[in-house]
Amino acid sequence: MSLRAVAAASGVGAPSLSNIENGRRDPSTSTVDRIANVIGVRFIPIVDNRRLSAADAVDLIEESTANGRFADAYRLFLQLADDLAASNAVERILLAAEEPRRTGSRWLDAIAALVEQRLGEAHAPLPTWVAANIGASDDVWEPRRTDRALPSFTDIADAPEPFRRRGIAIDAGELGSV
C-alpha cells in the first residue's frame, strides 16, 4: 500500500507516517494498532521484562565488536542466553521471532545456534531465520571473550549440537549461568 493510502485509511497523517517509518517519531500504541489494522497485521504488545531479543542482541554485539569491545559483545551473548533460559516457551518464541539483520559475522551463527538450543529445550518451533542460518561446520570459530586476544581453548566436540553443526566453539557450560 502507498503511504497516502495507509494515511487515508488509518486517519494518521502522511507526514506522521513518514516520520514513524523513518524512525523520527515513536507512535503511540493506538496509532500502531490503527496502522496495523489497515495493512492487515495484528499488533500484539508483549511485556518483555527487559529481556534482550535475538535481533537486538545481533545489533548490540556488532556495535560492540566494531568498537573493539569484545568482552561486552560476549557478555551480551551470555545475557541473551540467560534471558532465553529464564523465559517460558511463548516468551522465547517472541524474543527470537524477529529476524536479525544479516551482518556476515559469525556472531549471527552463534545466536542462531543459541536460539535453536533454547527453543529446543522448550520444545518450541524454530523461526525460519534460525533454520536457514546453517553456519559452517568445517570452519570452526570461537568468539573472543576478552578485549585482549587470547588463544582458543574450546574443543568443538564440547559444544552443544546446534553450535557444533554451525562450527561455533562454545562449551555447553558457558550457557548455564542462569
Image (cartoon, rainbow, N blue to C red):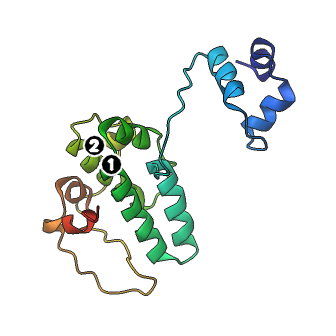
Judge the density around disc 1: few (<14), some (14-19), many (≥20) Cα neighbours within 10 Å.
many
Q: Which residue occupies 21% across, 75% down?
A: 154
Badge 1 amino acid: Val
Query: Are the residues at dot 1 and dot 2 in contact (C-beta closer than 8 Å)?
Result: yes
Judge the density around disc 2: few (<14), some (14-19), many (≥20) Cα neighbours within 10 Å.
many
Where does the image place residue 72, in percent across and percent down from the top left? 48, 73
Asked which secondary structure carries label 2, the reply is helix
Q: How many numbered callouts?
A: 2
Relative to 85, is 29 on the left or the right? right
Of residues 55 and 123, the one drawn nearer to the viewer in this rendering: 123
Q: Which residue is mark 1?
A: 115
Where does the image place residue 26, in percent across and percent down from the top left? 73, 40
Q: Quadrant of residue 167?
A: bottom left
Q: Which residue occupies 34% across, 87% down?
A: 150
Residue 152 makes an appearance in the image: yes
Where does the image place residue 114, in percent across and percent down from the top left? 31, 54
Badge 2 amino acid: Leu
Asked which secondary structure carries label 1, the reply is helix
Q: Which residue is mark 2?
A: 119
Relative to 21, is 162 on the left or the right? left
Where does the image place residue 53, in percent across and percent down from the top left? 46, 49
- 5 is higher (above) or lower (below) than 135: above
Q: Quadrant of residue 152?
A: bottom left
